[in-house]
Amino acid sequence: MMMANLQFFCLLVCSLAIIKTGCAKDNWVEKTIVKNAISKGAVCLDGSPPAYHFQSGFGEGVENWIVQLSGGGWCTNVTDCLDRTRSIYVGSTNIMGPWKFEGLFSINKSENSDFYNWNKVFVRYCDGGAFTGDVEYVDPATNLHFRGARIFEAVMDELLAKGLKNAKNALLAGTSAGGYPTMLYCDHFRSLLPKSKRVKCFADAGHFIHAKNPKQARGFEEVYNALVTLQGSAKALPKACTSKMNPVLCFFPENILQHIKTPIFIAMSAYDSFQVNKTLGHDIFSCIFSRTCTSSQNKTLREFRSEFLTTLPKPHNPLLKGVFIDSFVHHSAIQWRWTIQSGLVVNNVSAPEAFADWYFDQKYWYVIDEKDLPTIPK
């Protein structure tokens, strides 16, 4: 059931993206299988080799690189993980097809003027553990492999040899479940590129907080506890965090952001649809779209927004920690709402504009939407 819901959600989002982008020429990019990954034990849930989609840069962007870690939830038990191996999106590269490059990955200068000609890499998510798992043992009854951390290293090794090591400018980005490993590996990514002029990171729709209300916190706690116990993820987490608290808590951004030294930009809705649904529950999630929220439900939404904002980096140094927080109900913007025409706007600046200014050291934005209740985007 979980996998069916995930596939329906993906199909729905893709359908909306097609409607949004109209009749523009599609840019589908074939997958590239990571060489020598299997010999390194860096494999997907079903033992298939990891993969990415690569499009070469051109013109002035030939020495610049974007590497994005894709998202798609997590699997938290054997049944869920087995279901994912049959998904064309998140489980096995044996059945994954091409991926459509758009938004930040668009090669259309009129839509993506700052990054259109960069080398672009979209890393497929096939481990179910946010690129953090590392378990050597494989149960022959299930043949499930939990090797997400190894996948990240194998992909980086291949990209460095492909030309990433010579990057002038580089960006590690991640969406949703790919947002956390972007934070986790941000400094490591920087260390791989000592000669690069500018290396930064970008977490899109991955700032899932640890709510103070135990009932609200339960959903994400259960997910992250499963990653620690099932996928052996604790080994990949920052020791600066795990030495002080339960490893489960080190999956929450507010507990690791202070340790990240490489500049990182966080973009997300204070009312992210995935987070609201998982944290506050389906009733509140539904009332937003039906516009039937009671005064009590609006109070809960306002309180959650206030709590969410307290977990963000403080605004005193946006050079290192840039922020763009809107109040629209959506999940992820980097692909489907990341053009000059479709970018979400807060305080007269769009998310793509704010990020580009921040990345190229033109202006260090720290943007918070002042609306204290959710808005449904057009």
Image (cartoon, rainbow, N blue to C red):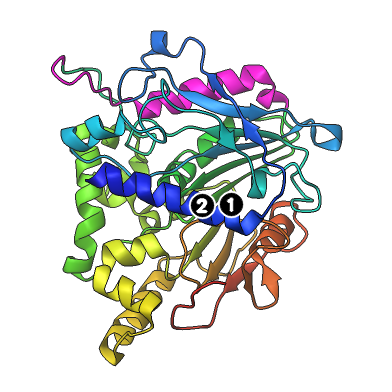
Query: What residue sits 53% from the left and 82% below the top?
Result: 370
Judged left or right of residue 55, residue 152 is: left
The three-letter amino acid code for the residue at tag 2 is Ser
The three-letter amino acid code for the residue at tag 1 is Ile
Judged left or right of residue 217, residue 264 is: right
- Is the residue 214 above or below the residue 41 in the image? below
Magenta-drawn segment: 140-166
Q: How many marks overall?
A: 2
Q: Is residue 112 magenta?
A: no
**Mark 2 lies on residue:** 15
Q: Marks 1 and 2, Cα distance to the nearest angstrom?
A: 5 Å
Q: Is residue 148 magenta?
A: yes
Please tell me whether the stretch drawn in magenta is mainly helix, strand or loop.
helix
**Mark 1 lies on residue:** 18
What quarter of the picture does the C terminus occupy? bottom right
Q: Are marks 1 and 2 in contact (CB under 8 Å)?
A: yes
Judged left or right of residue 66, residue 148 is: left
Furthest-left residue in this view: 141
Query: What residue sits 80% from the left and 36% below the top?
Result: 61
Element at badge 1? Answer: helix
- In x, y percent, where is residue 77? 18, 37
- Is the residue 349 above or below the residue 295 in the image? above
- Is the residue 271 above or below the residue 178 in the image? below
- In x, y percent, where is residue 75? 26, 39
User: How packed is label 1: few (under 14 Cα within 10 Å), some, or many (20 or more)?
Assistant: some
